[in-house]
Every structure is written in C-alpha cells, then in structure tokens.
Amino acid sequence: MRFLLITFLSVFSFQSFACSDLLDSSLRLLDSDDEQNLCEYSGQVLLVVNVASKCGYTPQYAGLQRLYEKYQEDGLEIIGIPSRDFFKQEFSEESKVAEFCSTEYGVDFPMFATAKVKGKRAHPFYKKLIAASGEEPQWNFNKYLINRDGQVISHYESGVEPESEELTAMIEKLL
C-alpha cells in the first residue's frame, strides 16, 4: 500500500509540474543578463501582457499590479513583456523601463526584456502565443490568459481593463 501511495504521489507531482510546449521558452529578465525559462511557471495561471511606458493604456499597470496582489497567492502570475512594436511607445533603455514601472506603478510582477511581439521577427514565445490563440497583438496591453496546464484559454484586446469583470471572472474560474 505504501508503495502505491508513493508511486501515486510521484506521478501526481510529475503531472503537476510538467511543462507545456508553449511555456518551454526562455526570456531575458528586464534590465539583466539573466534568462528565465517559463517552465518555472508551470502549474500556475498566467496573464501575459505586452506593455509600454508611453501609451494611452499605460495606466493599466496599476490594475495589473492590483490583480497580481489580489490573486498571486492563489496561483496567478502576471508576465510583463515591454515592446516597442507600436510607434516605439516604450523606452529604448531597459533601465528606464524598470525604473518607470517601479516608481510610477510599484510593479513587482515579473518583467522581462523588451521584445518584438508581432510579425516575422516576433520573439519565439510570442509566435507560440499567436499560433495557440490565433490572435496577434494589435496594440500595447494585449493580454493572453494561460491555464495551469500551459494552454492559452483566451486573448483580450488592449481596451479590456485588467480588473474588468470579463477578465477577473475567467481568472477566478481558472484558479
């Protein structure tokens, strides 16, 4: 009986932490030389957002941070990926991006290096997001919601506020 229990727990643990093809991607941390593989977020609900510091939607950082604070302990991770794809509305220096996010909005959710998020030169992770969702970002603050199994569940356009009923209801359902 003990052997069966140990075997069950081993299989359960492996399944809980298995990494999906989507998450098997590495991104460089913002203003750093360090890379992080997104498999580290396996088993969590992820909200991936392409962000920019000089955009009309930039105040969404505040809502993203509140969302993170509210649901992080339940298993939500927010991943911010700055992009200059839309009229270069992001600082070219990553140190300025990091400072802006910290001082203006108190962002403490994971932020990664500036990356292309659309077109042929999109970061490989974004190419996977686009393929999985059928949706390419049309502007800054597009949101991709990924379930605990590492599958894209939904895509939200820039105008969908982080704390909207539409988005929070889906997050709560996945948590």
Image (cartoon, rainbow, N blue to C red):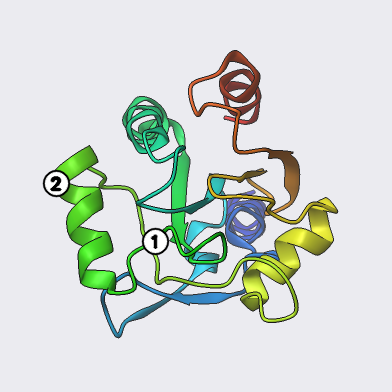
Query: How many residues crowd around disc 1 within 10 Å: few (fewer than 14), some, or many (20 or more)?
Result: many
- The quadrant of the rendering that contains the C terminus is top right
- Nearest to the eye among marks 1 and 2: give it: 1
Q: Looking at the image, which residue sits at the far top?
A: 165
Residue at 40% x, 72% y: name it.
Answer: 113
Counting from the top left corner in percent of width and height, residue 155 is at 72, 41
Quarter residue 121 falls in: bottom right
Q: Is residue 21 visible?
A: no
Residue 70 to residue 40: above or below: above
Counting from the top left corner in percent of width and height, residue 73 is at 36, 33
Residue at which label 2 appears: 103
Q: Looking at the image, which residue sits at the far bottom?
A: 33
Query: Which of the pair 52/128 is nearer the observer?
Result: 52
Residue 105 to residue 175: above or below: below
Q: Amino acid at mark 2?
A: Thr
Q: CA distance from mark 1 to mark 2?
A: 16 Å
Residue at which label 1 appears: 90
Residue 84 located left or right of residue 103: right
Residue at 46% x, 60% y: name it.
Answer: 81
Q: Is residue 101 visible?
A: yes
Query: Which of the pair 57/128 is nearer the observer?
Result: 57
Q: Amino acid at mark 1?
A: Glu
Quarter residue 10 falls in: bottom right
Counting from the top left corner in percent of width and height, residue 124 is at 66, 77
Verify CB contact (< 8 Å) between mark 1 and mark 2: no
Query: How many residues crowd around disc 2 within 10 Å: few (fewer than 14), some, or many (20 or more)?
Result: few
Q: Tag 1, which secondary structure?
A: loop
Counting from the top left corner in percent of width and height, residue 110 is at 36, 56
